[in-house]
Image (tube, grey):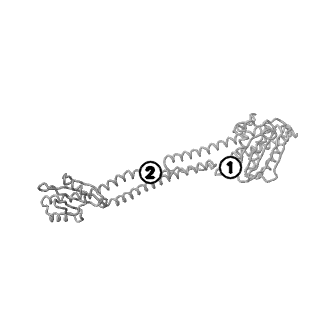
Amino acid sequence: MRRALAGIALAVTSMVALSFLIPLALLVREQARDRVTTAAEQRASALSPVLALTTRRVDVQQAVAELDSRDQLAVRLPGGFVGTPHAPREALDRAVRKRETLAMDTAEGWVYLQPVVLPEDRVAVVEAYVPAAELTRGVWASWGVMSLLAVGLVGGSVLVADRLGARVVRSSQSLKRASLALGSGDLDVRVEPDGPPELQDAGAAFNTMADRVVELLAIEREMVADLSHRLRTPLTALYLEADLMGASPGARRITTAVSQLEAELDSIITAARTPLAAGPAAGQAPGRPCEVAEVVAMRLDFWSVLATQQDRICERSFTPRRTAVRFPEDDLAAVVDALIGNVFRHTPHGTAFAVRVERGDRHVLLTVDDAGPGVADPAAALTRGVSVGGAGGTGLGLDIVARAARAADGELEIGRSPMGGARVRVSFGLA
């Protein structure tokens, strides 16, 4: 923007300067020419009274010497010339014949011819000559001064435009940095409104927007915490039902599952009621790495109990190499639960599935295959709020997985598995 403003100022000021400079330069040249030609005409006119009184060569020579010391005056008398003539002979003859005052440019300069009528109808011609150098004396110096003034004016205008542009650019860059910081998760960033009134209004609007974003996020987190807390009531009912069942194996499984669910709810409530994160790393994965294979194996052990009850065959394959990724262990466990939970939710009992963890050059791949009906529209399945199988789910599971993959420098892919059903593959960047 600074360069554009400086260019505009340069173009506009240059056009204005040229529009004044060119006519002024021509005027200076004409004035210089008029000054010397007028002086020459006056000298020639001063000889006319002398010629009216006498045409003696000696008297005329003396008068010419008194009026001109630079050999720029000459008189053509009926009997010859006094001084050195510079006018063409044709012009002299015309002035004598037609008794006409002439002014003309020659190769050497400018010539003025003034005829004087003498007694007995004779004609003398007074010639005033101005060399070409005197016609432009002082013109080049004047042009140089005017050019320097024009350059100074143009340079000054460009400098002022650059300073004004720097102020605008500084304000806009500050607003840009604050916007990028807010987009990266720094909720505490604010701008100091500066610059033109429009940018000051934009800065104030940005601060208002940032305050509103923080307020809305706080409200959303409180809502999540409240909703999670409301789930404690049915959990308590499940505890009571498990107590009524006594010490049977089913009651113990229910109690264990309810305890794990309660622990998950406690972690959700704690995270939701934690003050909003601030800084560039807000919303990104923390720096502590975790092992994908270990987390997947732990969650698969949990789901294998339900798989046994539903007669599902579960195959697992884990790479022996390290699979450390810079991603929270709890979030990774939530990803695994979402993927395996979709298999249990959208496939009939007895449907087999397989979980595989592989390591590539730069990513760890988590693949979940099943022998179910598959996913008819993978693009729609990745849309938040759209259930994978249309079975009445919330449609948030795969969205959680996709966002987790992006946070871990990976991606989510949905396709057809070798088992005939759906294949969901998630990649995580290696730590």
Amino acid tagged 1: Gln
| Label annotation for residue 130 | none
Image height of 168 relative to 136, above or below: above
| Label annotation for residue 11 | 2
For the residue pair 265 and 129, the one nearer the viewer reads as 129
Which tag, 2 or 1, sits closer to the chain's start? 2
Amino acid tagged 2: Ala
Q: Position of residue 316 (x, y in %)?
A: 83, 46
**Residue occupying image coordinates x 34% and y 55%:** 25
- Residue bearing the label numbered 1: 284
Q: How many labels does the image show?
A: 2
Q: Can you tell which of label 2 and label 1 is closer to the viewer?
A: 2
For the residue pair 274 and 173, the one nearer the viewer reads as 173
Q: Position of residue 20 (x, y in %)?
A: 36, 52
Neighbourhood count class around disc 2 (C-alpha, 10 Å): few under 14, some 14–19, many 20 upward: some
Q: Is mark 2 on a helix, strand or loop?
A: helix
Q: Is mark 1 on a helix, strand or loop?
A: loop
Measure the C-alpha gap from mark 2 to mark 1. Answer: 49 Å
* Quadrant (top left, top right, bottom left, bottom right) of the C terminus: bottom right
**Residue occupying image coordinates x 46% and y 53%:** 161
Horizontal relation, residue 231 to residue 160: left or right: right
For the residue pair 70 and 79, the one nearer the viewer reads as 79
Q: Where is residue 129 in the image (x, y as percent from the top left)?
A: 25, 60
Q: Where is residue 149 in the image (x, y as percent from the top left)?
A: 38, 57
